[in-house]
Amino acid sequence: MSQSVRIEIPETLFRELEKTLDKTVFSSVNDLILFILQDYLDKQSDGQVDARGIDDQAIRDRLKNLGYL
């Protein structure tokens, strides 16, 4: 296992994530955050998300709904 570092998030965000745990397969907020971050990085490297975190498919869907595509 690789070494880890400590990060800080606002307590309000932590509490919101805690509330969602029972709706997921994750047993801790830490596991949920690790999944979210890894998923983001995977999507970014696949070109599904640009540097600002925008999902390309969501943009295409929005443009199609507006009649541009």
Image (cartoon, grey):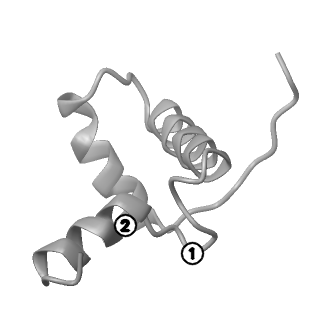
Label 2 secondary element? helix
Q: Quadrant of the C terminus?
A: bottom left
Seen at 55% across and 49% down, the residue is 40
Say which label, 1 or 2, has the lower sequence index: 2
Instruction: In this rendered view, identify the residue nearer to me: 27 or 35.
Output: 35
Left or right of residue 17, residue 45 in this image: right
Seen at 67% across and 47% down, the residue is 45
Seen at 43% across and 63% down, the residue is 56
Q: Which residue is mark 2?
A: 12
How packed mark 1 is, by other alpha carbons closer than 10 Å (few <14, some 14-19, many 20 or more), is: few
Seen at 33% across and 71% down, the residue is 59
Left or right of residue 63, residue 35 in this image: right
Q: Residue furthest top?
A: 1
How packed mark 2 is, by other alpha carbons closer than 10 Å (few <14, some 14-19, many 20 or more), is: few
Label 1 secondary element? loop
Vertical position of residue 52 compared to residue 16: above or below: below
Left or right of residue 36, residue 18 in this image: left
Q: Report x, y in % for residue 37.
A: 57, 46
Asked if the residue at tag 2 contacts the one at tag 1, i.e. Cβ–Cβ closer than 8 Å, the answer is no
Instruction: In this rendered view, identify the residue nearer to me: 55 or 31.
Output: 55
Q: Quadrant of the N terminus?
A: top right
Which mark is nearer the camera, 1 or 2? 1
Q: Report x, y in % for residue 63.
A: 24, 78
Q: Report x, y in % for residue 67.
A: 13, 82
Name which residue type carries label 2: Thr
Instruction: In this rendered view, identify the residue nearer to me: 16 or 43.
Output: 43
Q: Which residue is mark 1?
A: 52
Name which residue type carries label 1: Arg
**Separation of residues labelled 1 and 2 (CA atoms):** 23 Å
Q: Residue furthest right?
A: 3
Vertical position of residue 25 compared to residue 46: above or below: above
